[in-house]
Every structure is written in C-alpha cells, then in structure tokens.
Image (cartoon, rainbow, N blue to C red):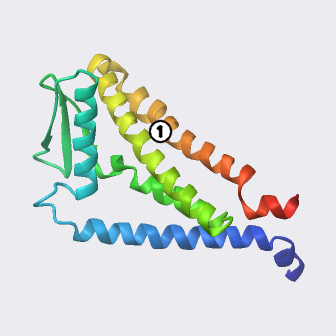
Amino acid sequence: MKELLVKYKSVIKFILTFLLVYAVLSFSYKLYLDFSDGSKYYPDYLTNLVAKQSESLLHTFGYDASIAKHPHEASMKLIINTKFVARVVEGCNSISVIILFIAFMIAFAGKFKTTFLYILAGSVLIYVVNLFRIVILSIGLYHYPWRREELHTVIFPLIIYGMVFLLWMFWVNRFSKLKKKHE
C-alpha cells in the first residue's frame, strides 16, 4: 500500500488539493449567496451585474433589450423587443465555473506569480465569454425559440466548459510544475 501511495503521490496531492480548494471556494460562495442583500441587488450582486452587462451587450448589438426582476423566482428576466427570452439565474453568473477553474489551477500550480496571473486572466476571460454566451443564447432564443433545448443544454455549456478545458490544457502543457518535473 505504501508503494502505491509513493508511486501516485502527485496524483493524490492533486486530487486532495483540488477537492479542498473547490470545497473552500464553494462554501465561501454559498455564504456569499446566503448573506447577499437581495433588496439592493436582486437576486444577488453578481447575478444582477451579469444581467445588466448582458443587457448592455445586447444594446451594443442593436437589440432593444431590458431586464426585470422575475416576480416568482430569484432571477432576472431578459427581454428583447418586449419578448421575454431568458432568465438570468445565479448559475448564469459564471462564478461556479470560475471556482472549478481556480481549484484546478491551484491543484496544478506552477510558480506563484505565473499561477496567480493565469488564474486572474483566465477568470476574467471565463466571465467575459460567459457574458457573450448569454447574449448569443438570448439572440438565438429570440430568433429560434424552438431550438431552446439544443441551445441551452448542449451548445452553450460546450462553449464555456470547452474554453475552461482549453485553458487547463494550455496551462498543463505550458506552465505547470508537473510538466517541468517530467522534462
């Protein structure tokens, strides 16, 4: 058993670090959600910000867009040309994806400065791509409402998780300590 632990030490360390960081960040985010003041920023500050920024991007693309508090659930309604096309819920704000990204990055860390800058740049990129994902999804739902299921459950998760996977692969192949150990 000891031989296996020694042989797979780096794998075990990666898994434990990933799980610990993911658990701590997820718990912290849950605390944020539990204690966020929905009276000022509904449903929470980050989701509200993403809804407002999505609305602004839609305006940039020439659409008459607006957002409104959803009366029956914790979400913002995204409206294009008076047509309700999408809900911006807490899961749309990309924070859970960023937490997943950060946990992997810390578990596969390289030099501190490089890791920190990559986490920062990657998190910003994920956030921005997520905004464009919401905008493209909203435009798609406006023009092709019968494609709702394919757009929301296949295409757009593929965009965000595919990009995170590419960021991870770039990191592992370019900057991680494990790569340097095996060279």
**Quarter holding residue 101:** bottom right
The answer to which image quadrant residue 88 occupies is top left
**Direction from residue 24 to residue 181 in the image, left or right:** right
> In the current view of this chain or complex, which residue is farthest to the front?
113
Query: Is residue 43 placed above or below 107 in the rendered structure?
Result: above
Q: Is residue 9 above or below residue 44?
A: below
Residue 24 position within the rendered picture, expressed as x and y whole percent measured from the top left:
47, 73
Residue at the spot x=48%, y=32% of the render?
154
What residue sits 53% from the left and 43% below the top?
A: 161
Kind of residue sitting beneath label 1: Pro
Q: Which residue is mark 1?
A: 157
Q: Position of residue 102 (x, y in %)?
A: 53, 61
Q: Residue at x 38, y 34 (%)?
A: 132
Camera-nearest residue between 25 and 131: 131
Q: Quadrant of residue 15?
A: bottom right
**Which of these two is toward me, 174 or 158?**
174
- Most extreme residue toward the top is 143
Q: Residue at x 49, y 57 (%)?
A: 120
State which quarter of the image contains the C terminus.
bottom right
Number of callouts = 1
Horizontal and vertical percent position of residue 91: 35, 50
Q: Quadrant of the N terminus?
A: bottom right
Left or right: 179, with 148 as reference point = right
Q: Nearer the viewer, residue 114 or 2?
A: 114
